[in-house]
Image (cartoon, helix red, strand yellow):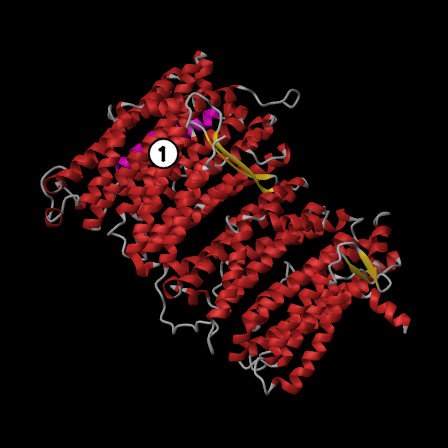
Amino acid sequence: MHPFSWLSVVIWLPVLGGIVTLALGDSRAQAARWAALVSSLLTLAACVPLYLGFTNGTADFQFIERVPWIPALHAQYYLGVDGISLPLILLTALMTVPVIIAGWSVVEKRPAQYYAAFLIMEGLMIGVFAALDSLLFYFFWEAMLIPMFIIIGIWGGKRRVYATLKFFLYTFLGSVLMLVALIYLYLKSGSYSIASMQQLPLSLNEQRWVFLAFLLAFAVKIPMWPVHTWLPDAHVEAPTGGSVILAAIMLKMGGYGLLRFSLPITPDASHELDWLMIALSLIAIVYIAFVALVQQDMKKLVAYSSIAHMGFVTIGAFLVFYILSATGSTRGAVMGLDGAMVQMISHGLISGALFLCIGVLYDRMHTREISAYGGVVNVMPKFAALAVLFALANSGLPGTSGFIGEFLVILASFKASFWFALLAATILVLGAAFNLWLIKRVIFGPVANDHVAALQDLNGREFLVLGVLALTVLLLGIWPAPLLNMMEASTQHLLQQLVTSKIAVGLR
Amino acid sequence: MTNLFGVAVNAWPAIPEIWLAACACLILMLDVYGGSKHRGLTATATMFALLIGVLLTAGFGMIVQRTLLFHGLYVADGLGTFLKLAGFVTMATAIFYSQDYLEQRAMGGGEYYVLCLTALLGVFVLISANSLLTVYLGIELLSLALYALVAFDRDSGIAAEAAIKYFVLGAIASGALLYGMSMLYGMTGTLDLDTLSAIVRRGPDGGLIIGIAFVVAAIAFKFGAAPFHMWVPDVYEGAPTSVTMFIATVSTLGSFALIARLLSHGLAGLPGYWTQMVAAVAVLSLLLGNVVAIAQSNLKRMLAYSAIANAGFVLLGFATGRNIGYQAALNFTIAYVLTTLAAFGMILVLSRSGFEHDEIADFKGLSSRDPLLAGLMLVLMFSTAGVPPFIGFWAKLWIIQALLASGLTWLGIFAVLISVVGAFYYLRVVWYMYFEAAVDQPAASRRPRMRLILLINTLAVALLGLLPNALLDICQRLFP
């Protein structure tokens, strides 16, 4: 196949870079920074052959690496990407670079450990998306909690210990039952390979239990209402980089899990329980959007808006069955899945950028209270331009990537039911409301106080980071075809798996 | 003469025990005549004795085929060889960690090492037991040495209290074991575990069940499993840290051997009767250990409750009554011993003359005082909490898999959920080390050699987490 194992490179290169950074130590902070930057850039560079070498139009896994890992457990070191995982890997590699740069002169406390934690986490997160063996997947999935626990706990805000413990225990609790489900599937299929689990016939009852175990793990990560309460705490207390990674990548792992595990492994249970998923998603969209509206803290506002936007991912993924039974149109069903995927990528970029913007303000003012700001545009015009762009993208402005995902999902929900579409579309109003109101209070108006008056506009480093993200958001918004083409075959294939009942004859 | 020679040749498989017994006597003599003149002589001699023991076991005693010796009282097999090698290595590492600590507290006398060797001999006898009598001999040899070791710091009131408590409760447990064994003997007319196994296969009767209940209670006591755990916290906290480490590691290997020989071999014919008792004990231990550990402020005491909880995990493996469960239990035991050894080594490396460094609060800000040690402790804590990529994850995973494969799904679910509770108190140590400001403390001595061993020990925890197959494979082969 492919002569060079690029996937292993993008997983282990950042991990190694992290270890080197750690070894350089806090006393050689400048060297550690450069080591971290170089590692993250090299990882991004190593993604280029992945992107270029990826063949669109096939749902087969590519860049496959498969060697025995734990023969005693029939687990393999089995990696590969398809149109669903590759965009997420690219997103991960892309978002880690700004995180490293954003911390450049800001993180004073134990800088080497800071960068090392982010690099190691990058590798582990890419591992989550690339693993085709469910034990390997779980291995990365859980291991990633360690660096995040450290990041929030050391570099977080006042209540960081509470937030990080809540984050860890919440997600740990969610995951362990998934482990039980994976072991159960392994014992039935004789292999931890995800593909063999997807092909395994299961009775409806088994599927229900497995689905619920998976759901707990993924719902906590996404997070879906009502298991979302860890997210605002974690976001508010996390350092800027931590928030960016949390919002941009970690939440996507939950969505990815639904697409890779829940839907194909338990299609019949997904069909049976799709009302539950849609209901929870709609609650997340409508209710959480209202909650976002009343936040006083900028980070909390964006955190709640993330929950609402992730509701679009879950509803897009689970509309399939309604669309098929209402219209029979596979085109419409795929639209929902595509929308979910685009929404994940776009939300990763936009929410990451928004957290970086908040970080820019926080580094200068050391507060995230909305009321402490006002009239920032007068002193920081460059910043204001970019921040407004991201806020508009977050509310789904056409021409930005935020529009594509939301539009696809709302279109798909119209095919399912008018009421779903109506409720989902409230995000267009509410999202615009909380985003624009935030902008109005923070950016526009007269200069609120002396602190704001003394603000410095973006320096070159910050401008570069936000500028690149802004270009990406616009590019995907104006020309989403490369992304859509990349995942088209895979979402089609996923739909095939969904409509094929796994209930073996006589098991029902 | 030929007869004696014949016995000697036939006794080859017992070379580890013979060597240990000889060394214990020799080192006692060595200490009497040279110990006071050359500091550290006894410790060095002990290290050499253990090293040669490893070589002897690996060279001559590497028995893979099951061999019976001494009229069936003694068995040598692959499991025995593996556990003995583990015992030698564990004890050597433990002694390595303890040396400084003992010398600073004027406990470096030769008796300490002789008692440790005797206790190890007791563990070995347990490992090789193929008769109820041998089992009892091993238990007593181990326990009596341990009682003395716990009280080794003779000026410490808390240590004396712990030793008395351990002794009294241990004596009761020994009594229970003897009583249970006498019932087994009365019902079956044999002390030999092979024969016992064959006889009980015919079916249970009332006396046998009562006998089994007593035996299970004694095993639970040895493991420190609830509801026979009362001695564990006091002994762990009261004993000198080096002795606590010994009990938590070397003695745990003995407990594993005890249950493997007595229940999964000797009573293999009646699994349904003892597996339920073992499962009940395991569930209680997991619940009590994990919940009460949260309330502890002393690290040794916390590790005591963690030991209770971990005993619960090992017993869950045995509760399956099947080889996959025994494999998982063996794997768990080795993982636990490896990790616990390093955790106590951490306390010892940080301790100073007159300062134990055994409160969790003593770890506050360790990451800024000593980033390397804090990093190692982080690995150890996450490993015991069962988070990948460390060895503790695979240990738990395999137990849960064995439970599910045996149809004990609810026990598996209980085990994973209680692990989440357990994660909290391991995380708290990380929290104190990383998230709290440093407390003012004089720098610990560097102890470069000890750090190196600690580093290697922790790397083993991490590497066996990344590539766990070697250990899993051995465990699978030992319970085919």
| Residue A232 can be seen, yes or no | no
**What residue do we see at 52% from left, 75% from top?**
B101
| Residue B54 can be seen, yes or no | yes
Establish if B429 lies above or below B53.
Answer: above
List x then y, in percent, for residue B210.
Answer: 79, 56
Image side of residue A364 versus residue B385, left or right: left
List x then y, in percent, for residue A389.
Answer: 21, 32
Image side of residue B162 versus residue B7, left or right: left
**What residue do we see at 59% from left, 57% from top?**
B336
Magenta portion: prevailing SS class:
helix
Establish if A370 lies above or below B336.
Answer: above
Instruction: Specify the farthest residue to the front.
Output: A3
The boundaries of the magenta stretch are A274-294
Indicate whether residue A137 is drawn in magenta.
no
Which of these two is toward me, B291 or B387? Answer: B387
Establish if A199 lies above or below A358.
Answer: above
Indicate whether residue A284 is drawn in magenta.
yes
Which of these two is toward me, A487 or B452? Answer: B452
The residue indicated by pointer 1 is: A48
Establish if B440 lies above or below A490.
Answer: below
List x then y, in percent, for residue B72.
Answer: 85, 61
Image side of residue B115 versus residue A48, left or right: right
Q: Tell me which amino acid carries mark 1.
A: Val
List x then y, in percent, for residue B148.
Answer: 65, 76
Label 1 residue SS:
helix
**What residue do we see at 39% from left, 45% from top?**
A14
